[in-house]
Amino acid sequence: MAEHQDIDVLVAGAGPTGSTLAADLLRRGLSVRVIDKAPHAFEGSRAKGIQPRTQEVLEDLGVLHEAHAEGGPYPLAGLHLGPVTAPWRMQQRNKATPDVPYPNILLLPQHRTDAILHRLLERLGLRVEYGVALEGLEQDADGVTATLSTGERVRGKYLVGADGGASVVRGATGLGFVGETDDSDRTLIVDCAIDGLSRDRWHMWPRVSAGACPLPRSDQFQVMIRLKPGDTPDLGHAALAERFHALTGLKLRDITWTSAFRPNVRLVEHYRQGRVFLAGDAAHVHTPAGAQGLNTGVQDAYNLGWKLGQAVAGAPDSLLDSYEAERLPIAAGVLGKSTELYRSLSKHRVAGLKRGDEERQLGLSYAGGPLAPADAPATKTLHVGDRAPDAPCTAQGSRRLFDLYRGPHFTLLAFGPGATGALPSLAWPAEGADLRRYAVGSGRGGHGTDSAHLTDDTGGLARIYGVDGDALILVRPDGYIGDIITGDWATSFATTSKALTPG
């Protein structure tokens, strides 16, 4: 058998989680392979809601414009109650603000999300290897050797299982997958066209537990039909059309994808075993309510990518331990929220249809975790571990902070004369992710060769970040606050950088 040496990371699974991770690793200069046991890319609409925080991830990767071009807003719900159709707003429509540029969920079928990410991978020089399954793995202190269904043995520094709820990688680790599967509760999903049904509503027939959501930029709907216990559905196209007609009086046609799923609610006991990591559905599976599963998986990848990049460059192993410490509690909380929503839906409660701020995932924080001690300094609005908000500013032709954050680097903002004076001399290693330094103020030029000037034209940046004095704010590559320093600049910064960078 052939054995290839010296790739940095092997990713199993080419869905949104694995593809996001691979893209992030590639832009950090790592060597990556992505395998997927499926013969081709996923073709269904399944996970169709892209939350605001995930849109920010896509913007950082440079593909949000594609997602917006191919997606659209969620329509009003239309509740069919006998002869009456009542409008219902499931999603609160929020206005964009300087700190939250993408406040609303985006309706985007999963196969389009996958395609957008796969095109990005191709631009970065990588093609997904379909029809290639992981059949076994062995790890030691220096790496992981994976045996593939092709007979090839691949040697990598790390292996990430993003291979779904039935993860082979998770199975190979022996890690427990704790939770429940309700075999008596199943739902049909069908992608199809429907004659005579308007496309300006997410149609719902509560009395027969059926719904049809129009998919943007197409003539298709995603149809969902809740099955009764013991109901064994015929997935033939004619039988599905007949079932839908019996429930709603409408005719569906041109079926392109079907699935029957059971609500799983499970969480892996650990996200890491040595040099093997789990992400997305391989680590946590959700009910479909609230559009949480795909989004949580993408953010797993976003958290893990920069840490793997730093570890390959020589950062301490404890940085990789922080992946589980930060993401497992988030997944546990999200699982509880999606389960709560799903139970409301199962009891035909209108409350189960409502979506709000929690689902948007903008308020999720790593505060209190290993990289964000609870006793760390804070500003009036932010703690270490919080999402770094957008804000208006002027720097190097950019008009907002997110333009400056975009990319695989760390960002350091200096507020006030003391922090600004210290900015150029703060030590940062040449290996691993770069550090970009900005002195926040007005009217003066750059500070040293490694820092640039950033103008807070309106005062909005200082207000949003809650700063009214001297402070250094370090922003991690995944857009969370890495540190807030209010004095003893060099020593405090050195302590932080030691935990995050090669040393």
Image (cartoon, grey):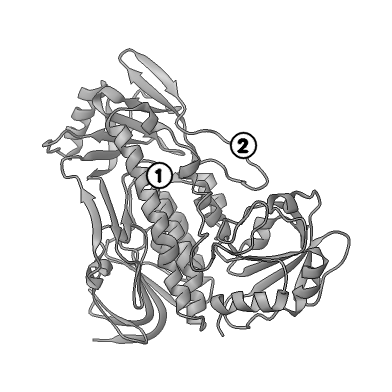
**Residue 14 position (above or below residue 95):** below
> What residue would you read off at disc 2?
95
Query: Is 351 or 2 nearer to us in this picture?
Result: 351
The residue shown at (25%, 33%) is: 225
- For badge 1, the amino acid type reads Ala
Q: Residue at x 61, y 70 (%)?
A: 409
Q: Secondary structure at mark 2?
A: loop
| Residue holding disc 1 | 291
Closer-to-camera residue (228/199) = 228
- In the image, is residue 196 above or below residue 253? above
Q: Residue 374 falls in which quadrant of the image?
A: bottom right
Q: Secondary structure under badge 1?
A: loop
Which mark identifies residue 180?
none
Residue 449 pos. (x, y %): 79, 77
Q: State left or right for residue 124 relative to residue 281.
A: right
Counting from the top left corner in percent of width and height, residue 12 is at 33, 68
Q: CA distance from mark 2 to mark 1?
A: 20 Å
